[in-house]
Image: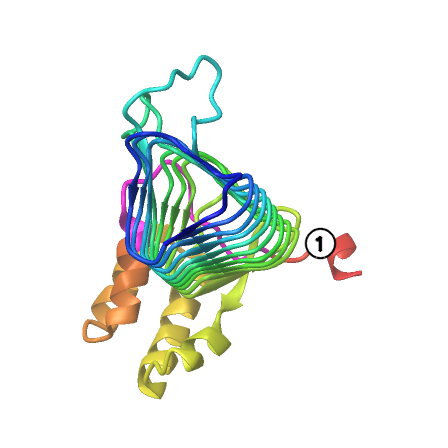
Amino acid sequence: MTIHPTAIIEDGVLLGAGVEIGPYCLVQSGAELADGVRLHGHVVIGGGARIGARTEVYAHAVLGGDAQIRGARSGSSCLVIGADCVIREHVTMSAGSAKGHGITRVGRAGYFMAYSHVAHDCTVGDGVTFANGVQLGGHVEVGEGANFGGLSAVQQFGRVGRFAFVGGVTGVNEDVIPYGMVIGSRARLTGLNLIGLKRRNIARSHIHALRGAFRVIFQDESSTLASRAQAAAQRWPEIAEVQEVVHFILADAKRPVCSARRRTGVESE
């Protein structure tokens, strides 16, 4: 391993093979860096952080700091980050909170651009992409492969499904279905992330079924959202993607599901 002489590594830190720690980094007691982790200069790793193998952390990132909650106290809470992530400059990821479940989880192979933030008690899936300045409130759940445009934000306790796309400068105050695409100052469901579906090599027949289910669920307002979702599940019982969307909608959640809304005159302009 390589440790710059200006770095501070407290007693009780576990370092794997091939770890590189750059100038003026601080790694607090209790932290764990797996094999091949690389910290650029001025990185702070809290004592509750577990950083996965080969993850690369750029300058001035702070990982595993206390939850940003009034009256929060340091304790046994932690942050777990998977392998092969890229965490760019000034990214912050908080540890879990005593009021929550005590752990913040970030999956493997995520790419987090500068100034993005993952708050306390969040669960973030594998392979996500956060553009610059993306912000997650506390207790947010993000599915595998979700993609966030710059300066977008998700309200606390929100959910963003697998392979969803959130446009830049979008405020997400309602849950985003898997494979959905939202945009607007307050998120509006504009359709399916068809480009993402194709990139994931989803079968064409499944994409057609998912488009049909989208029309049934979101474009027919003659009944409740739950009943329309159940109708889609019965119509396409063999299509895993349709069943995933239906399960997401019917789940017991803190937030309503983001729906397609008719554009106002101002939005159209």
Pinpoint residue 225: horizontal percent, then vertical percent: 37, 52
Pinpoint residue 97: horizontal percent, then vertical percent: 35, 26
User: What crowding class fits label 1: few (fewer than 14 Cα within 10 Å), some (14-19), or many (20 or more)?
Assistant: few
Residue at the disc numbered 1 = 264
Please indicate whether residue 140 sits to the left or right of residue 150 in the image: left
Pinpoint residue 27: horizontal percent, then vertical percent: 42, 36
| Residue shown at the point (38%, 78%) measured from the top left | 200
Give 183 or 64, whichever is nearer the viewer. Answer: 64
Name the element at disc 1.
Answer: loop
Q: Which residues are magenta?
A: 248-261
Residue 148, located in which quarter of the rendered image?
bottom right
Extreme residue toward the top, this view: 71
Extreme residue toward the front, this view: 5
Residue 237, located in which quarter of the rendered image?
bottom left
Q: Is residue 155 above or below residue 77?
A: below
Extreme residue toward the bottom, this view: 204
Give 95 or 144, whichever is nearer the viewer. Answer: 95
Give 228 or 269, whichever is nearer the viewer. Answer: 269
